[in-house]
Image (cartoon, grey):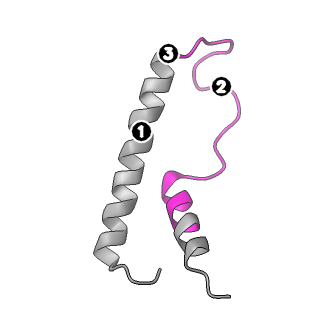
Amino acid sequence: MIGIKYEDSITLVGLAEKSHREKQAEHEKRKVRLIASGGGRKVEMTPKEGVYLLCSNRFRLA
């Protein structure tokens, strides 16, 4: 990533993961279940991988 310190990137990832967990918890509270908890399709990417992917695409050199 360009223009961001390593410590700042770690903080950014931590905040993204915390926000993701909070949103998932809120979503799970309101969710009407058709299948058992824990069933269904598994996620393809962790929040950490998502943040790094977004940042790397944003600062890619052409």
Task: From the viewer's perspective, tell me whether residue 58 is left or right of residue 14.
Answer: right
Which mark is on residue 11? none
Q: Quadrant of residue 43?
A: top right
Horizontal placement of 28 versus 18: left or right? right
Magenta span includes 33: yes
Marks 2 and 3, how far apart in space?
Answer: 17 Å
Res. 30 mark: 3
Q: Which residue is mark 1?
A: 21
Few, some or many residues within 10 Å of mark 2 (<14, 14–19, 20+) = few
Q: Which residue carries the number 2 mark? A: 39
Residue drawn at x 49%, y 25% is: 27
Q: Are marks 2 and 3 in contact (CB under 8 Å)?
A: no
Magenta run includes residue 51: yes
Task: Determine whether the residue tagged by mark 3 lies in a helix, strand or loop.
Answer: helix
- Which residue, as the protein is rendered here, is positioned at the far bottom? 62
Of the pair 49 and 36, the residue shown nearer to us = 49
Earlier in the chain: of badge 1 and badge 2, it is 1
Camera-near label (1 vs 2) is 1
Classify 25 as above or below 29.
Answer: below
Specify the quadrant that holds the C terminus: bottom right
* Range covered by the magenta-colored residues: 31-53
Q: Nearer the viewer, mark 2 or mark 3?
A: 3
Binning the other alpha carbons within 10 Å of mark 1 as few (below 14), some (14 to 19) or many (20 upward) gives few
Which amino acid type corresponds to the residue marked 2 in the rendered image? Gly
Q: Amino acid at mark 1?
A: Arg
Q: Rounded to the nearest whole Å, what is the CA distance between mark 1 and mark 2? A: 18 Å
Q: Earlier in the sequence, mark 2 or mark 3?
A: 3
Look at the numbered disc 2 and give the secondary structure of its residue: loop
Where disc 1 sits, the SS reads: helix
Q: Quadrant of residue 20?
A: top left
